[in-house]
Image (spheres, rainbow, N blue to C red):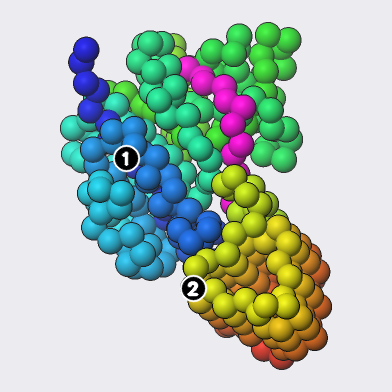
């Protein structure tokens, strides 16, 4: 059986505006998920699938991503493509034509999504369909919060990229999960400069009679686009709802319930933390109550503080608070 050489591009260049102010401190691809950057979970799965080289495009705080991952991750060499201006999801392929063109199959995957990716099934579907591209779509997620989804006919092929074009009974609306495979021939269609997959490649491809296959999946998938989605993703990941980093310090009378406590965190006496995420280096003062919240890196909550359904970060000039936020004692409390 022929071995299909696989290379991947992990998209990691976005600003992560919807996750601000957290992304002023940590770029979204490396926000932690139980002690490991979210993008590292994806790279680990790509490595297990036999991906022999991976590229990441960088723009917003790209040096932080590079520092976190190094020159290789999970035994796979990493190539970085630094963008002087944002090139978009499709434009990111332009500077990487030579790198990606060496593969028989090219996998593009969002670096800010969390999933146990069905990569083997996605690649197999692409090979067997003979399609120009194959998109992974969610079978059980409501498409309305995600712009209406894409149109899938007979559970097998993409027939429209916009909901207004998919109103027949034979077409189901599905959420694109941020992973797709393309044939190397499509690299010739990538224009110079900024561009995106939908308007600059996939819609013209369908108009010219090209084919885009679909793989429907029922696996849990998290788009880390907002503080609440990030919180839910962290809590849902893994077999157990709660997790505490080995080097975290938690007082013996503190109670953690269904929460994730990251590296170098200190939870002091008589605290109650429930369904929350405490990020690296944070300190939760004595007798605090933290409920369904995200406490940002390095935050020091004063004693007796109560936080409920908030994301708490330090005040920074490049991370202005929203109108709905409150600022107290050098900390920003954003509703989630």
Decide whether residue 9 is among the magenta residues: no
Question: With 100 as the anchor, is 159 left or right in this view?
Answer: right
Residue 126 appears left or right of 73: right
The disc placed on residue 127 is: none
Identify the residue shown where x is 60% and y is 17%: 152
Q: Quadrant of residue 312?
A: bottom right
Which quarter of the picture shows residue 151? top right
Seen at 32% across and 40% down, the residue is: 47
Q: Is residue 148 above or below residue 22?
A: above
Residue 14 or residue 43, whichever sits in front: 43
* Mark closer to the observer (1, 2): 2
Residue 280 in sight in this render: no
Q: Quadrant of the N terminus?
A: top left
Quarter of the view holding residue 60 = bottom left
In front of the other: 262 or 24: 262
The residue wearing badge 1 is 47
Q: Which sits in the foreground, 177 or 83?
A: 177
Depth check: give the residue in front, 129 or 68.
68
Q: CA–CA distance between discs 1 and 2?
A: 28 Å
Q: Which residues are magenta?
A: 213-227
Answer whether residue 27 is visible to the viewer in this image.
yes
> Can you say whether 296 is above or below 168 in the image?
below
Residue picked out by circle 2? 247
Residue at left 18%, top 32%? 102
Within-10-Å neighbours for mark 2: few <14, some 14–19, many 20+? few
- Residue 76 in the image: state x and y as whole percent: 25, 46
- In percent of the image, x 68 and y 8: which residue is there? 170
Across and down, in percent, residue 52 comes to: 23, 38
Element at badge 2? Answer: loop
Helix, strand or loop at mark 1: helix
Expressed as whole percent of the image width and height from the top left, the position of residue 271 reads 75, 78
């Amino acid at each position: 059986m022929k071995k299909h050489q696989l290379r991947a591009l992990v998209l990691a260049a976005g600003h992560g505006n919807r996750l601000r102010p957290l992304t002023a401190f940590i770029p979204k691809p490396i926000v932690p998920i139980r002690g490991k950057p979210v993008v590292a979970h994806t790279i680990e799965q790509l490595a297990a699938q036999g991906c022999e080289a991976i590229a990441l495009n960088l723009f917003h705080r790209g040096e932080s991503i590079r520092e976190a991952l190094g020159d290789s991750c999970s035994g796979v060499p990493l190539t970085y493509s630094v963008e002087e201006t944002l090139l978009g999801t499709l434009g990111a392929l332009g500077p990487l034509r030579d790198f990606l063109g060496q593969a028989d199959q090219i996998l593009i995957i969002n670096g800010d999504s969390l999933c146990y990716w069905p990569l083997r099934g996605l690649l197999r579907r692409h090979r067997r369909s003979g399609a120009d591209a194959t998109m992974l779509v969610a079978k059980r997620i409501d498409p309305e919060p995600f712009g209406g989804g894409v149109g899938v006919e007979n559970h097998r092929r993409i027939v429209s990229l916009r909901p207004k074009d998919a109103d027949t009974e034979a077409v189901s609306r599905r959420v694109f999960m941020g992973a797709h495979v393309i044939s190397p021939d499509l690299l010739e269609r990538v224009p110079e400069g900024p561009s995106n997959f939908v308007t600059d490649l996939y819609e013209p491809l369908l108009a010219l009679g090209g084919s885009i296959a679909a793989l429907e999946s029922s696996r849990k998938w998290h788009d880390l686009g907002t503080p609440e989605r990030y919180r839910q993703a962290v809590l849902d990941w893994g077999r157990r709802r709660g997790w505490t980093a080995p080097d975290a310090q938690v007082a013996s009378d503190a109670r953690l319930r269904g929460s994730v406590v990251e590296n170098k965190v200190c939870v002091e006496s008589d605290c109650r933390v429930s369904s929350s995420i405490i990020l690296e280096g944070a300190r939760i003062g004595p007798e605090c109550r933290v409920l369904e919240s995200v406490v940002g890196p390095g935050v020091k909550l004063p004693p007796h503080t109560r936080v409920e359904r908030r994301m708490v970060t330090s005040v920074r000039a490049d991370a202005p608070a929203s109108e709905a936020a409150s600022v107290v004692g050098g900390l920003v409390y954003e509703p989630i």
